[in-house]
Image (spheres, grey):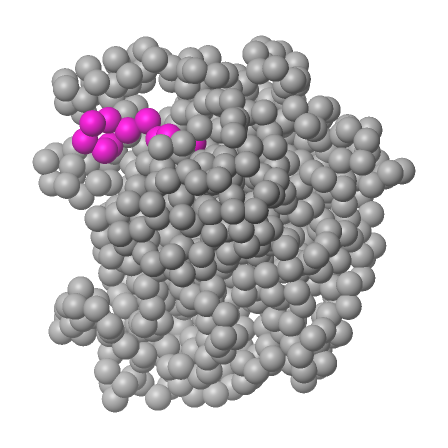
Amino acid sequence: MKILPSRTSLFAWLGAVVTLGLIPHPASTSPEFGASGQEHQDWPSYGGAPENNHYSGLRQINRGNVKRLAVAWSFDTQEEGGLQTSPIIVDGVLYGITPTQKVFAVDAATGRLMWKFDSGIRGTQPDRGLAYWPDGKDKRIFVGVMNFLYALDAATGKPVPAFANEGRVDLRENLGREPASAQSIDLTSPPVIYKDLLIVGGRNPETLPAPPGDIRAYDARTGKLRWSFHTIPHPGEFGYDTWPKDAWKTSGAANNWTGMALDPQRGIVYVPTGSAAFDFYGADRPGDNLFANCLIALNARTGERIWHFQGVHHDLWDRDFPSPPALLTVKREGKEIAAVAQTSKQGFVYLFDRANGTPLFPIESRKYPPSTIPGEVAASEQPLPVRPAPYARQLLTEDSLTTRTPEAHRWALEESKKFRSEGQFVPFSVGKDTVVFPGFDGGAEWGGPAVDPETAIIYINSNEMAWTGALAPNTGENSPRAIYMSQCSVCHGEKMAGSPPAIPALIEVGHRLTPAQVAATIKGGKGRMPGFPNLKENQLSALIDFLTSGESKELRRSAPSPVAMKFRFTGYRKFLDSDGYPAVAPPWGTLNAINLNTGEYVWKIPLGEYPELASKGQKNTGSENYGGPVVTAGGLVFIGATNFDKKFRAFDKFTGELLWETTLPFSGNATPATYEVNGRQFVVIAAGGGKDAKSPSGGVYIAFALPQEPSNITSRPEMKH
């Protein structure tokens, strides 16, 4: 057991569970559970398996006994900042990441620290997982630390000297943009491993300049680049004519930031991509812009395209495919079809034949209005699946406004009259905000779905909040304010108000941070913010002066603005009522079970609460949630995810009934994992918080199991529903 509390609240929480007997003291641990030579059932890949189905065949913890689940061990990273990591478990060892991107290994049965690796780089980006690759006695952990991909010895945590440059690959290199040091790319999701290849994407800026979102495969032994797939096609490549001539030299992003899925038998890797930069104004990139906003099936050995589907043509709304796809088998007319399911921010599930990309539910092209912005040519049609029905509402109307209080409803009604609300794919305009519903953070998000292979039921957690956005003309290209507007206002807004807590306000940031701290954040990024190494020193200095003093001074030496765009985004804005709650009627977050054999919903429930509202009787409102579910043969769906109530829950996978819940020390904004060591099943989740401005953040891994009694170790098989 590893308990290293560093904050008063964590001491109190751990003290309570120890007092209740929920965490055994080391002396009370029965030796039979620590004996060597017993079988393990691992969670060796991000998402549980290369197919990314978040499924476990374990059934020791099941619907009949889950109410007895208790804390088995806890490992505190001793850091703040939040966690989005889903750990992997191999041969009784759990590998995880701390909030600042240190890597560690603990005994998966006890939480005892085995090793920790500190690269010397303070990670400031999300880091959602790791990858494991064995080759005989050579066993390696591959993990991203900012822009580096490290190969670590799984037994010691030390970098493998023979891999690339003393154990790491610099992902800024080999992108066709120079200097490499000026590129911004971070590995926020782990590599997919196919035989001896590491296949990676990366997180890129959503403003220009940005490097291209190439999908790349590296040799797992040497770190040598083996192939690249250009998501912004080069001359002669498929899709080149969907961009202006030579766009591959100047456009950026169209990247895979969320991870991938792999069919090991077919040797196909499935790659979802995000939008091209600039997200909201695309006059410099007329055309459909392949392979932005696509699900791409690539030959994992060569990187050659097999098929693709573009979910949004010429994206102007930041409608990335936000999660790794999930592979499953569905039934059609008595036949089994290997399929791939892709969720979206819009609330759609797309389902395709895994081999050839044939849609397994009809997809219709619908017409949408043109842009009113000079130079912008929005796509006239977008593809929408006919089934399943969307798992999030699609249109903000007067009837869908909050009724939490009469005052909140009146406020929301008056505010909504200022917006343009016409559903999906309405181009932004100048002077009037357009509603994006569900919002920029979905619908679905990076946690991804879980799929039960026995039933073909997919479990999707979803946000259901409205956001708004607009465009404004860019002026004063050489001023520090123009640099702020082109690089920073897309998130923090033209008035620096941000959208707390995910996007902090920058008003009076000079009172909270030193110029050096501001500079470090701009260069390296932090949280959901990418770094901006492209800024020249005089631009950086002028921007820091502007942020810390509010004065828009001219640059000391003439230098061009990073990119001169005629229009800019005015900033992400959540539609919140005057008390800070979503200004739409609940549910504000949901958990959905959909049968992909039929496209019909099995059940749908609110997910999450606001504790202060629940105490007043307003329960089951749902809330924002990040991190996905896990489904088991024991009849359970485990999920944390919810931002404000800090709950970790288990639901009956057949009915959606809540069977068990516990309160974590910090919210569990990460996908859990489940595994077996020495005959005992565990469920573990990383709890770090960080998305609720009213609560502290941390970085604790907590494992749950049934109490150690002989009757629990050989439990009867879970009866099928």
Residue 327 visible within the image: no
Q: Quadrant of residue 434?
A: top left
Residue 560 seen from this side: yes
Picture layout, residue 430 above or below residue 296: above
Q: Nearer the viewer, residue 123 or 52?
A: 123
Residues rendered magenta in the picture: 571-581
* Residue sitting at x 73%, y 51%: 177
x and y, in percent, of residue 59 in the image: 43, 60
List x then y, in percent, for residue 612.
Answer: 14, 41
Q: Residue furthest right?
A: 236
Quarter of the image containing the N terminus? bottom left
Looking at the image, is 521 positioned above or below residue 31? above
From the viewer's side, name the closer residue of 248 and 98.
Answer: 248
Going 38% across and 15% down the picture, which residue do you hit? 419
Give the percent coordinates (x, y) of residue 656: 35, 40
In the drawing, does residue 443 fall left or right of residue 134?
left
Residue located 24% across and 72% down the image: 6
Residue occupying the far left of the picture: 616
Q: Quadrant of residue 342?
A: top right
Please name the predominant secondary structure of the magenta segment in the image.
Answer: loop
Q: Residue furthest front?
A: 556
